[in-house]
Image (cartoon, rainbow, N blue to C red):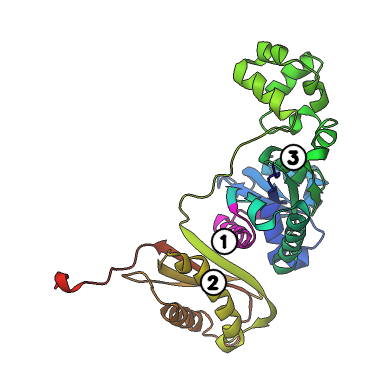
Amino acid sequence: MTARLIAHLDMEAFFASVEAMHHPEWKNEPIIVCVFSGRTADSGVVSSASYDARALGVKAAMPIVQAKTLSPQGHFVPVRHETYSEISESIFTAMYGFADVVEIASIDEAYAELTQKCGSFESAEKKLRAFQENIKKDYSLTCSIGLASNKLVSKIASDEHKPNGFTLVTPDDVQSFLDPLSVKKLLGVGPKTEGELEKMGIRTILDIRRTSLSDLIKQFGSARGQWLFSSSRGIDESLLQPERERKQHSKIWTLVKDASKWEEVKELVGENAESLWNETAGKGQFFTQVSVMGVTSSLIQSSKSKTFNIPLSTREHFSQALEELYLQLMDNPLTYWRRIGIRVGGFASPPKQKRLGDF
């Protein structure tokens, strides 16, 4: 039987990295993305911290007051979910180009099955490494990727070499890869389970594998015991769960050179619009909402949108809508744009053509 090819992609320090992308002048400086409660200037918790901030001890869920004590010179910014979601969607949408199935696990991680389209670990690794480089080039963001024969091992693998790491675990290497790792590397082993395992003298995945199934079931129950027994052997037959219904699709990109006029970006917008059309309307997903967005050279975000009564059913109408919106967005020739993008939503079926009998 041919081994499955399952990749797990993990965007690293995602929120903080997006803020660093928007603020290149903060390079190598601590960036802390926060959820401010509004009660006081410093009340709330840390949502994400850059690696420079983490080196100082700042971590997610930490009170902002404590984070400011550890990193008094850090840049503390409010969380911007819409911005992060747009970039996340743009990155993960591109995975459909080389993957059979994509499962969006969260805003900063996704699984991809490449079994049919790639056929071998060598081919899959080549595609994924190129994708990893494109993310770094297009977004100035890094991600770590794990490639294995199932979701369990690929998830663990993506965490092994950070930042911007790539870890390949073939079926022959699964046991040698898993055995030395701490039991807490298994997704689902929290502090409570880790403590129970430690009481049994079990600290590594190899220790679990050396424990009999009956002893594991006796301690953790049938389902949990069986899961630990199988997971320690790298066994996982779960399928990827693709998105049932995507509410919107988007593409965002950084310009090689800041632009101030529609004519300067028209060709690039056309290329990305064609790609977005093929991913949506080209597959029968027609939309009623079109938006364009941009980030200026001074990091000000802006967008323009239009909603149609019936879904757009031709590429020409889509292109015309984009041009109208971009002319509105770029109406000031003194404003220079660093990043621009397209978003479509409001998916619906186009009106059916009437037959003679309907008149």
Q: Is residue 167 above or below residue 253?
A: above
Task: Check disc 3 and report the residue beneath it.
Answer: 156
**Mark nearer the N terminus (3 vs 2):** 3
Query: Type of residue at label 2?
Result: Met
Q: Residues within 10 Å of mark 3 (few under 14, many from 20)?
A: many
Please give the name of the residue rendered at 45% of the width and 68% of the height, measured from the top-left corner.
281
**Can you give x and y, in whole percent of width and height, for residue 318 in the image?**
44, 77
Q: Residues within 10 Å of mark 1 (few under 14, many from 20)?
A: some
Alpha-carbon span between mark 3 and mark 2:
36 Å
The magenta span reads 77-101
Query: Type of residue at label 1?
Result: Glu
User: Does residue 210 appear to the left or right of 84 in the view shown?
Assistant: right
Main SS, magenta residues: helix
Which quarter of the figure has residue 209? top right
Circle 2 SS class: strand
Q: Is residue 235 above or below residue 275?
A: above
From this viewpoint, is residue 124 visible? yes
Q: Is residue 95 above or below residue 301?
A: above
**Can you give x and y, in whole percent of width and height, for residue 276 in the image?**
53, 69
Which quarter of the figure has residue 284? bottom left
**Can you give x and y, in whole percent of width and height, for residue 322 in the image?**
48, 78
Please give the name of the residue rendered at 47% of the width and 81% of the height, measured from the top-left corner.
328
User: Does residue 138 appear to the left or right of 286 in the view shown?
Assistant: right
Contact, CB < 8 Å: mark 2 with mark 1?
yes
Task: Check disc 2 and report the residue beneath it.
Answer: 293
Please give the name of the residue rendered at 38% of the width and 73% of the height, measured from the top-left corner.
313
Query: Type of residue at label 3?
Result: Ile
Contact, CB < 8 Å: mark 3 with mark 2?
no
Q: Is residue 96 magenta?
A: yes
Which quarter of the figure has residue 138? bottom right
Alpha-carbon span between mark 1 and mark 3:
26 Å
